[in-house]
């Protein structure tokens, strides 16, 4: 087997079982492995450390499959990891969940591999050279889990370019999916477009938080900012909100949100859709004297990496400031950041700064994260991206 040898002392992260090896840690590459090929990782002294997938073009030069010298990295290794990930979900998810994440990359031992389920469709999103190598194995293993009629690929993430991989989108097994796959989440129905939607079509990671908003919304006037296809808006309505206002800048997302509302049998007279830039719209609502009892802020990733943090922090502060001003006394803000570059401590200090500038006293009622089908491996803290705070004013 081809191998990579680390610089002296650089085995430390591997011994802590971190799954990534950066180019700077590597002393020598033996045997010219191809992109995605499995390599043996050895310390400077030649001791076995791990088996990894080689990514010649990426700064993350190798991603580890196994720390076990006796492991065989093949299609059945991949299938076994998939089955293990799927079995955990079966125990964790709310009953009758129709859309969930089956495999969550590094945190399920499969770097670069995401597999989501929408009813009988599995959507696969591969982002590394190693994952790409085992594409067929994942598709077959996803079908072997049962109740899967088709596997569709949404490998169109920007990060693939860093791996030297072109985007690939289309059916892998089975036919082309319909524009809308209907999935139920709690009392709402969502028509998910796995071919064009964001991520693999839906923000599965917010499932538990939508359920919390549903429970808190009874008789409340709710504002859902960055609504996408209406996830939180519909949760609030089904929870008995007196009225919901939902803002998104994407007209097609709002059209989908309205279709979801109809599919869910909810009362369209209790919702107002606003197609607008959230930054300007929050100011405008505030200036008009409008106020709300519960506000959800679920913006897109302002800081994908650390180099965007300063600008992202200003954007988070701005939306949080205006949302806090828009709350009635006693009102609740459900505020989120899905930026990997902004950690929980920084996010909390941004929200605290926003409250100070808004002139309101806020208290954290609850800390929120991604649902259980988006685990964070202890050896991979980078896996923690979604954090939220429930702030009462
Ligand atoms: N809360 C949603 C997911 C939100 S994704 C859910 O639970 O499903 C982020 C959304 O923000 C996207 O729909 C995107 O169109 C929207 N968006 C991005 N920038 C925006 C802006 N400046 N103003 C308003 N909406 C914006």
Image (cartoon, rainbow, N blue to C red):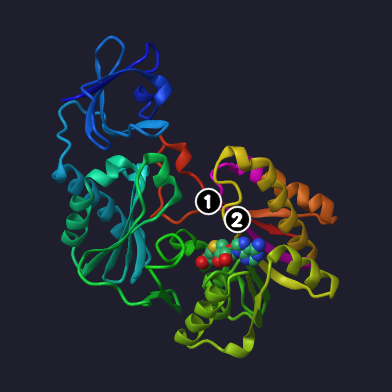
- Marks counted in the figure total 2
Query: If the image is split into quadrants, where does the C terminus sit?
Result: bottom right
Q: Is residue 165 above or below residue 215?
A: above
Instruction: Provide the residue span drawn in magenta.
Output: 326-347
Quarter containing the N terminus: top left
Ligand 1 image position (quadrant): bottom right
Q: Is residue 265 above or below residue 189?
A: below
User: Is disc 2 surrounded by few (<14), some (14 to 19) or many (20+) residues within 10 Å?
Assistant: many
Tell me residue 44's x, y (percent).
31, 11
Residue 218 placement, left or right of 371: right
Q: Which residue is mark 2?
A: 336
Q: Position of residue 83 (x, y in %)?
A: 21, 52
Q: Which mark is residue 169?
A: none
Q: Residue at x 55, y 41 (%)?
A: 305
Residue that carries the numbered disc 1 in the rendered image: 386
Residue 295: % across, % down: 67, 67
Name the residue: 61% across, 51% down.
302
Distance from mark 2 CB to nearest ligand 1 atom below 8 Å: yes
Between 262 and 1, the residue placed more toward the observer is 1
Q: Locate residue 148 relative to residue 375 in the image: left or right.
A: left
Q: Is residue 296 visible?
A: no
- 284 sits to left or right of 294: right
Circle 2 sits in a helix, a strand or a loop, which is it? strand
**What secondary structure is marked by label 1?**
loop
Q: Is residue 332 magenta?
A: yes
Q: In the shown orientation, is residue 357 left or right of residue 238?
A: right
Q: Is residue 103 magenta?
A: no
Disc 1 to disc 2: CB gap under 8 Å: yes
């Amino acid at each position: 087997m081809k191998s990579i040898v680390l610089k002296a002392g650089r085995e430390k992260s591997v011994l802590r079982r971190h799954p990534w090896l950066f180019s700077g840690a590597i002393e020598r590459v033996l045997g010219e492995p191809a992109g995605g090929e499995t390599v043996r990782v050895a310390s400077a002294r030649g001791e076995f450390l791990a088996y990894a997938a080689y990514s010649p073009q990426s700064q993350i030069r190798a991603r580890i499959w196994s720390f076990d010298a006796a492991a065989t990295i093949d299609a059945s290794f991949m299938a076994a990891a998939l089955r293990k990930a799927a079995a955990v979900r079966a125990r964790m998810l709310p009953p009758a969940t129709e859309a969930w994440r089956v495999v969550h990359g590094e945190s399920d031992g499969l770097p670069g591999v995401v597999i989501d389920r929408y009813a009988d469709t599995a959507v696969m999103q591969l982002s590394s050279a190693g994952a790409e190598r085992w594409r067929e194995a994942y598709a077959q293993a996803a079908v072997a889990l049962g109740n899967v009629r088709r596997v569709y690929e949404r490998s169109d993430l920007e990060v693939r370019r860093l791996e030297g991989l072109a985007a690939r989108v289309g059916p892998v097994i089975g036919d082309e999916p319909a524009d809308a796959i209907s999935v139920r989440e709690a009392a709402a129905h969502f028509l998910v477009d796995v071919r064009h939607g964001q991520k693999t079509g839906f923000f599965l990671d917010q499932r538990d938080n939508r359920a919390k908003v549903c429970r808190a919304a009874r008789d409340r006037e709710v504002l859902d900012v960055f609504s996408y296809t209406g996830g939180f808006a519909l949760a609030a309505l089904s929870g008995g909100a007196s009225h919901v206002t939902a803002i998104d800048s994407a007209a097609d997302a709002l059209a989908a949100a309205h279709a979801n509302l109809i599919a869910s049998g909810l009362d369209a007279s209790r919702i107002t859709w606003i197609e607008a830039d959230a930054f300007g719209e929050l100011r405008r609502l505030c200036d008009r004297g409008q106020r709300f009892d519960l506000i959800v802020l679920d913006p897109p990733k302002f800081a994908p990496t650390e180099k965007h943090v300063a600008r992202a922090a200003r954007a988070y502060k701005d939306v949080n400031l205006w949302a806090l001003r828009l709350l009635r006394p006693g009102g609740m803000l459900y505020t989120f950041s899905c930026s990997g570059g902004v950690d929980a401590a920084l996010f909390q200090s941004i929200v605290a700064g926003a409250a100070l500038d808004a002139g309101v006293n806020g208290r954290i009622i609850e800390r929120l994260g991604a649902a259980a089908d988006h685990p964070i491996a202890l050896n991979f803290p980078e896996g923690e991206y979604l954090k939220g705070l429930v702030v009462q004013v």
